[in-house]
Amino acid sequence: QVQLVESGGGLVQTGESLRLSCAATAGTYRITTWAWFRQAPAKEREFVAAVNRNADRPYYADFVAGRFTIPRDNAKDTLFLQMNNRITEDTAVYYCATAPPGSWGARSESTFDSWGQGTRVTVSS
């Protein structure tokens, strides 16, 4: 499996921007699809965004609505989630996950076999 460590969470105001990071520290050769999920309080975990590691082919959940991007730095084995125009509904624990070959386009948790511990983001009005 891939070892993943998220960072960058915290408290922000609505409308502010925040960038999360996900560093892969082991098993990086296994990464094909690299994704962000989130779990809001009292809700199930949901897909946010993903990208193919070796091709710039990102895809997003509908609720992102152009507010988020998912840049990556392959040389540093790091994935980012750039979140702009934050709203209170973005309050959640954000998780980084990876999936093996053949998984591009996947949005289901069950496809992703490596997960980070999560980083908490709180958006206040």
Image: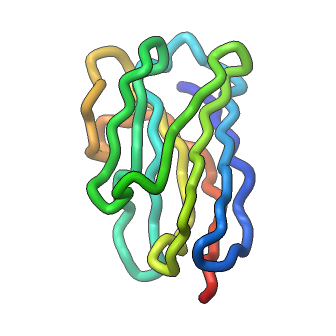
Residue 14 screen position, x and y as percent: 59, 78
| Occupied quadrant, residue 63 | bottom left
3 w.r.t. 83: above or below: above
| Occupied quadrant, residue 89 | bottom left
The color scheme shown is rainbow
Along the viewing direction, whichever of 3 and 9 lies nearer the viewer: 9
Residue 101 screen position, x and y as percent: 34, 15
Residue 29 screen position, x and y as percent: 55, 11
Side of 102 where 67 appears, left or right: right
Q: Residue at x 60, y 33 (%)?
A: 79
106 w.r.t. 28: above or below: below
90 w.r.t. 119: above or below: below
Along the viewing direction, whichever of 121 and 118 lies nearer the viewer: 121
How many tags in the picture? 0
Q: Which residue, as the protein is rendered here, is positioned at the far bottom?
A: 125
Q: Residue at x 37, y 76 (%)?
A: 43
Side of 5 where 31 appears, left or right: left
Q: Residue at x 34, y 45 (%)?
A: 60
For the C terminus, the quadrant is bottom right
| Occupied quadrant, residue 107 | top left
Residue 1 screen position, x and y as percent: 53, 25
